[in-house]
Image (spheres, rainbow, N blue to C red):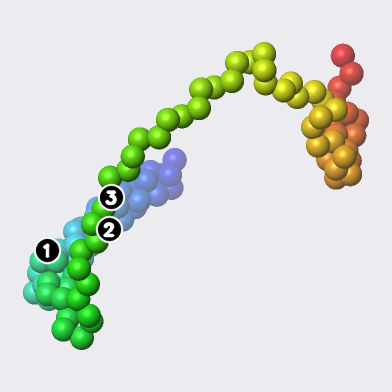
Amino acid sequence: MLIRNAWIRFIAVFGQIWHFLSQQFSRLWQLFSTLLGYDREGYFLDAEPTSQSPSQPNPTIATPTPETKPSPTPTSERPSRSRSNRNTNSKEMDYYRDLARQIRPKA
């Protein structure tokens, strides 16, 4: 009991120390990022286009024309998929199906 209580207190103190150190590291990181200018908006973006690359005019975006969708076919006209119609010729799938039949408990 004494060892367990000591361990709990050690973990609590370690957690407090870890929390303090992480706060200090966060403040230090914030200070360096402010000093180096990483927190400024647009730091990683080029503010002005470079004169070396040829300037291209802005492309115009054409508005899409609405297309008429074909009406869905009624369910009676759809071809029915039967079990023989599916891809059952796969040797690998047949192997796995046989394994599943062997494993399945007989009720």
**Residue 17 is at least partly visible in this image:** no
Q: Nearer the viewer, mark 2 or mark 1?
A: 1
Q: Position of residue 62 (x, y in %)?
A: 28, 50
* Residue at the disc numbered 3: 62
**Residue 69 is at least partly visible in this image:** yes
In terms of secondary structure, where does tag 3 sit? loop
Mark closest to the chain's N terminus, 2 or 1: 2
Looking at numbered disc 3 in the image, what kind of residue is underneath it?
Answer: Ala
Looking at numbered disc 1 in the image, what kind of residue is underneath it?
Answer: Glu
* Residue at the disc numbered 2: 18
Left or right: 88, with 6 as reference point: right
What residue is at 19 percent from the left and 59 percent from the top? 23
What residue is at 42 percent from the left and 30 percent from the top? 68
Q: Which of the 4 image quadrants contains residue 72? A: top right
Q: Residues within 10 Å of mark 1 (few under 14, many from 20)?
A: few
Question: 81 and 22: which one is in front?
Answer: 81
In terms of secondary structure, where does tag 2 sit? helix
Position above or below: 76 against 29: above
Distance of label 2 from label 3 (alpha carbons): 57 Å
